[in-house]
Amino acid sequence: MRVCVLAQWLVSFVVIGTGLVGLETRHAAAVPTYANNVVVIMVEGLRPDALKQAKVPTLDGLIKRGASTMKAQTVEPSLTLPAFASMMSGLPVEQHGVDWNEYDPPRGFIKAPTLFEIASFNGSKWGAAFLSKEKLLHVIKQDRRLLVNVCSINEQGCNAKKITDDVIASYKTATEGKPALFVVQLADADTAGHDQGWMSKPYLKAVEEVDRAIGSLIKGFKDLGLYDRTTFIVTADHGGHAKIHGTSMSEDKTIPWIAAGPGIKAGYEITRPVSLIDTAATVMRAFGITDYYVEWKSRPIEEIFVDRMGAPVAAGAEKPSR
Ligand SMILES: [Zn+2]
């Protein structure tokens, strides 16, 4: 086991070394504006039209400061665990195989590599996952470079505010400030949707609470001095209608997709079709990590990035590296 880890690190160093040499030559004239940190926030059950009906100053601010579409599409079935697996693996459900939606430990982990592994291996980035449903652990493989925090939505006090507070507290203490890729899942709106119906008053109120929690998370990054080099991506696993989701209806499948941070255009409306699956490659692109090869179906949303002289174009699946 020790040999494995050591070997992995050695390969990492080689990859990093190669990357640095490349960067120095290609960016001698222009300093690229890549993100040191990327925070991916999956708001469960968030419908785009909820952003029009609820008061969401934080998300409005991200839309203004960044690039967004209100027409992104999730996978089928439009359920949390398959969608989360697609976002993290860059693969459609039939390829990553996580087609169930319950916590069932004997089924083990997703087999495909996820964002955490790709980012840690190719960019030496540490990760942190903050989840409010333990079934998502099917997608989170244990790694010493990964901090995992799960509170169950069924527990008293496990809400968006607590989770976002945990992110900031953990960054300061448990991990000595190492995580660079944060994945945060907030279930409040989904719970309200199942209880009272999508677009109901309680649902919209839950969306507002989630917005406030994201606001305090962003403030936490400001207080830590990380804000200027952090990209925030906010999206959803699915929408919902009546008191359910999981169908191929537009209300279930259409989700918002918002990104704001260094190197990302401000006030930009994305024109090309966006799939939740594209989040994976776009996260790597935001980090400026392009020297990797993964067999995935994720394509970076290239149009959101400002032109950067001398910057490498995103690779991903289309341009395998050596
Ligand atoms: Zn649900």
Image: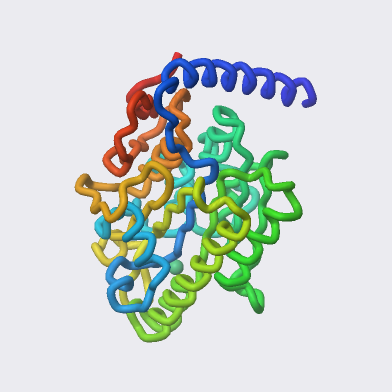
Q: Is residue 231 left or right of residue 309?
A: right
Q: x and y percent of residue 250 in the render?
A: 24, 62
Q: Residue at 66% across / 63% down in the picture? A: 166
> In terms of depth relative to the viewer, which is nearer, 190 or 178?
178
Q: Quadrant of residue 181?
A: top right
Q: Residue at image x 33%, y 40%?
A: 305
Residue at image point 38% right, 79% down: 204
Q: Is residue 193 visible?
A: yes
Give the quadrant of ligand 1.
bottom left
Position of the C terminus, as image quadrant, is top left
Q: Position of residue 97 (x, y in %)?
A: 46, 42
**Looking at the image, is 74 positioned above or below residue 45?**
above
Q: Is residue 42 left or right of residue 46?
A: right
The quadrant of the picture occupied by the N terminus is top right
Q: In the rendering, at what x and y percent does residue 74 appear?
A: 34, 53
Residue at image x 53%, y 33%?
Answer: 118
View extreme (top): residue = 322
Which residue is nearer to you in this view: 101 or 12? Answer: 12
Does residue 309 appear left or right of residue 149 in this picture? left
Residue extending furthest left? 271
Please, is residue 43 above or below residue 188 in the view?
above
Question: How far across and down, in percent of the image, does residue 147 sit?
Answer: 68, 48
Location of residue 192 (image quadrant): bottom left
Q: Report the number of discs.
A: 0
